[in-house]
Amino acid sequence: MAPPNVRGSSANRKAQLSVFTGYLVAAAGAAIGAALLIISLWQPQALAGLRSMASDATSSVGQAGASARTGGKSFFDAIAGYYRAGSKNADLEQEMQIARVKVAEAEALKRENLRLKATLGLHESDARPVALARLIGSTSSSARRFAYLSAGSADGVQREMPVVSPMGLVGRVLEAGAHSSRVMLLTDSESMVPVRRAKDDVVAFAEGRADGSLRLRLINLGINPIKRGDVFVTSGAGGLFRPNVAVAVAEVITKDGAIARVLSNPAATDYVAVEPVWQPEAVRMLKVQPASGKERE
Amino acid sequence: MIDPINPRARRDAFGSKINRDHSALLAFGVPWLSILLASLTPLLPIIASAPIVPPLAYLLLLAWRLMRPGLLPLWAGLPLGAFDDLFSGQPFGSGILLFSVTLIGIELLDVRFPWRSFWQDWIIAMAVTATYLVVAALVSGAHVDQGMLPALVPQFGLSVLTFPIIARIVSMLDRLRLLRVRRLA
């Protein structure tokens, strides 16, 4: 449809003025946006309260949707799943039989492990989760990878707390509202997790990439020892994440590490657990140190 | 004798023409409400590991703007963008800036090319959306590297395919918007 032609008539002074005012207000709006953008890039937590309030207000809607998602997979898998239901079912049954055997073996190993640890006098420090909650949504159209969690500071969730699913690490809490919080997923490009190879002590950093995979960067450069299919777990360095939580499996070997697939697909998890920060003292110390270092100089 | 009148003669697509008028609330509220609702897409139970879902609020804004020029005021980008920023995961302000600049840009385009077909609207919407996606990714605060642009391609492709559907939805909403529901006293 053609626009209403208010510009053409020079006689209608009022219409011309209102066009001018419109441009003025719109330009002011754009300028306000630019200013806010600079503020929030410079101080990412500056407007966190506003966002938490908004997500608190709408989290009940998201929760209803999340409970409808039963074992839902990612956007496309959910659609593709209908087409291969039969053959997939057969595959899964076979896989489950193998898995049952593996579970029995693992059980035996676990018992042996416990016995050996008891002889050594080590005790398991079991991290009790702070809260169990659902992931109610994610920023699926932005370049950042955040998810919304249906628990907030009323449930004891605080900033920096790790979020895990039975399949492995999901991310960590970035902002906590009263009844909902924002989680930075592992695949966000600002996320970095210290990891090690599950079978030995090859240490690396897992960084998020824009396309939803992880980049593993080895700390000790040299000959790259990573093979395809190697599983990486958290190393506990930094004190944020407790050690031995599964993170990713290496898929493509690169010069300085590997490209890895995240093990816990957040879309396929029903409930996630928010765990307390593993070593709060260490995290606090690491945060304080740079400031005190500056003072010394 | 007077011929019986066709019962449909006093009605059209928007309802009875007798004693009924458009409601101002519907006529001006529907576009705003639909765009605000589309801003809530991050609360849908889709947990994506890469950006794939098209920016629905932005596409809806484009569709309304291209189909009904003058319906949304030029400053609509400020409130709509602010609401979108609350949920989209972008740093606050990016939506305000991009929505406002888009509306100003299309306004200038309307001056130059007042009459367009749907194909031209589609091309315009896609060019604008491509710019929006790239700029939004650049200002999102994410780490910028050469892997970023290829990751946006599937999302752009989906946006291209979604726009005609959204334009169709907008034209359905437009019919709802113009229903004659107000009873004249």
Image (spheres, helix red, strand yellow):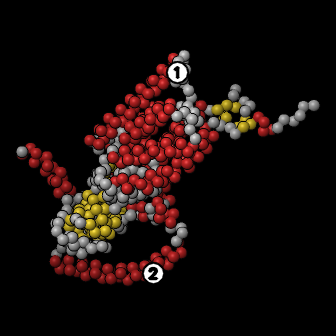
Whether residue B53 can be seen here: no
Residue B178's disc is none
Write the residue at 50% across / 59% down.
A68
Residue B26, picture quadrant: top right
Q: Position of residue B118 (x, y in %)?
A: 57, 43
Q: Nearer the viewer, mark 1 or mark 2?
A: 1
**Extreme residue in the left direction:** A297
> Can you identify the residue that label 2 sits on?
A94
Amino acid under label 1? Ala
* Chain letter of disc 1 in the image: A
> Can you identify the residue that label 1 sits on?
A15
Q: Secondary structure at mark 2?
A: helix
Q: Secondary structure at mark 1?
A: helix
In this orientation, which residue lies closer to the viewer: A94 or A84?
A: A84
Amino acid under label 2? Gln
Q: Position of residue A123 (x, y in %)?
A: 20, 72
